[in-house]
Amino acid sequence: MLNQVLSMSRNQKRMVFLLFDVLALTVTCWLSFALRYGEWDAMGFAHWPAYILAPVVAVPVFVRLGLYRAITRYIGPRALWTVVKAVSLFVLIWAAITYMIGFEMRVPRSVLLIYWFIALVVIGGSRLLARWLLLQQFPGGLHRIANTDRVIIYGAGSAGRQLATALESSSELSAVAFVDDNPALAGLEVHGLVIHPPEQLERLIDRYEASEVLLALPSAGRERRRELLALLETLPVKVLTLPGLSDIASGKVALSDIREIEIADVLGREEVAPHEALMAANIRTQAVMVTGAGGSIGSELCRQIIGQQPQRLVLFDSSEYALYQIEQELTPLCADQGIELATVLGSVTEQPLLELTMNHYRVATLYHAAAYKHVPMMERNMVVGVRNNLLGTRAVALAAVATGVQNFVLISSDKAVRPTNVMGATKRCAELMLQALAAEPGHGTRFAIVRFGNVLGSSGSVIPLFRQQIVAGGPVTVTHPEMTRYFMTIPEAAALVIQAGAMAESGDVFVLDMGQPVRILEMAEQMIRLAGFSVRNNMAPNGDIGIEFTGLRDGEKLYEELLIGEDVTGTSHPMIMKASEEMLPLAQLQPVLQQIEACCDAFDCEGIRDLLLRHVSGYKPPHEIPDPFSRPRRVH
């Protein structure tokens, strides 16, 4: 019965209230006389015309004062004050009419007060009762009936309250309860929603059939968020969140701020605040150039460089689309801050173009982020990978020396440590070349190398792939159940690269603190659960999304390392370490690079591999060289 009423249209519900008022005002009018005379028939129903007159007078007054315009679930003090005014005005008009008509037995004055009080209680109380039924028994009101998503808001602070207000007008999400860690708030009511302690969360999900939990805790640190997510991922709900305080600086929370929990919220560490002096040292008022500016790391470097007020920022990339995208994003930012923005489309293997660019824009600091990094693809395209990652780095470095660039920072990879693939071997060889150049006298370029592991959500990384597979209903593909990787957020990695480059003496190899390695299988399971699904495996054969193991691909290894040796020292930054590793003199390395270049020109993959095996310490490819032109395997 109640569900049928709730599912009516708004006009139908207004009519229900109107009919209720007609009946209630007639009955309460009789009750007022009965109480006055102390008998149920009130002197033989002598005043029956007054009973009929009451709703005839009341309904037009109620309509005129907007009593039927108020939406029940939003009734508040203003609407109740309207009820008081409407009932008071109606009773006065009703009394005046009864006296003017001159019923045979006039209405006693005491009946007016009794009727006013009873009508006020019944009319106002009926609205409050309806609101209670909607918000307590059916939180979210009609949204529950309309099969929209019911949300429990975790956090009853300012952000949570503003979000509850925003959800009142949403046709997609409906808040049904608050949960908050503060025991002093338990049992209180905010926006018609009761605040519950966290231990009642599972019961609330069952009671209200909630499908989502929304974390409205923008000021919570990453450690606290990880604790909450560890609790929530065991429950059958999808987890949503608000961005951090820095993203809600305006103090207003909009529905557009809500986003899905990302794996960065689970894996990310508590970030150490950047040292502002280090961030600005090689950038402020200088001309800065970024190669690979359209890539994941390169584009974030550009964003953070702009924040340090350079005189000029030069974007260099071989991808027209990527360069266009980052130019469109940065142009208004640079215009607002008076920073000159230049874009150059070209390959890092074109040394004349590089020298022309660096000379023309008087580049003082260069961040070299351009590289091919997809391991299996580089195994099948060895020549292109070597030419870009190794010979391209040589071209950029020589151009920097020739044009007097003061600071050169290479973005390296943990795959350079005892590499099992071409990508890692080219990165380690590029490190050796910069170390050798740094040891040469007679130039003013300071070379620094920054080595770190995977970044969360970068192009080609496993996380966007997992997200796509989950949206498609699975399965999620994992190469090996024991595979581990280091992870860091893109903004944190970019900030640490800038700071490490500012600390360097020429030839330094810096290693970023990546925290503890993460099992890829556990990460995939977390992403499935945080999306509101269950994992299908041998222990849970009826789960929503399964995980398939595809086996290690060419060049992959189960775990990555950050150090070749054990000789590492700390720096003034707690997240940056300096490694002391073997190097080769330039006189020994130059002929090797020339031979590698000749092999690339001849597409001699065997020759390239032989040279890398002899000169890159720890390089152990676990497979034969793939033939990129062999017949492709049929995909079933």
Image: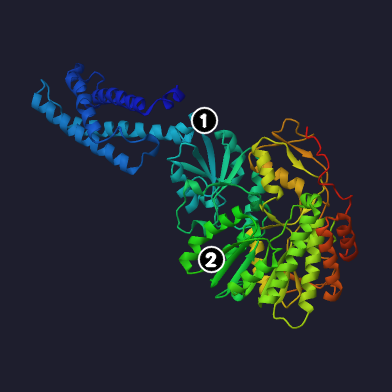
**Which residue is nearer to you in this view: 404 or 164?**
404
Q: Amino acid at mark 1?
A: Asn
Q: Which residue is mark 1?
A: 147
Could you tell whether 271 is left or right of 89 in the image?
A: right
Identity of the residue furthest to the top in this view: 44
Q: Secondary structure at mark 2?
A: strand
Q: Can you say whether 211 is above or below 445 in the image?
A: above
User: Which marked residue is nearer to the observer: mark 1 or mark 2?
Assistant: 2
Could you tell whether 49 is left or right of 390 in the image?
A: left
**Which residue is nearer to you in this view: 451 or 63?**
451
Q: Residue 240: in sight, yes or no?
A: yes
Q: Secondary structure at mark 1?
A: loop
Tell me the quarter of the picture where residue 551 sits: top right
**Which residue is nearer to you in this view: 1 or 373?**
373
Counting from the top left corner in percent of width and height, residue 131 is at 40, 35
Judge the density around disc 2: few (<14), some (14-19), many (≥20) Cα neighbours within 10 Å.
many
Identity of the residue furthest to the front in this view: 602
Residue 237: mark in rendering: none
Q: Amino acid at mark 2?
A: Leu
Write the residue at 89% across / 50% down: 624
Write the residue at 89% across / 52% down: 622
Q: Which residue is mark 2?
A: 341
Counting from the top left corner in percent of width and height, residue 419 is at 84, 59
Distance, label 1 to label 2, CA atoms, is: 50 Å
Could you tell whether 46 is left or right of 474 in the image?
A: left
Counting from the top left corner in percent of width and height, residue 246 is at 53, 60
N-terminal-most mark, 1 or 2: 1
Write the residue at 63% across / 65% down: 290
Tell me the quarter of the picture where residue 550 sits: top right
Which image quadrant: the C terminus? top right
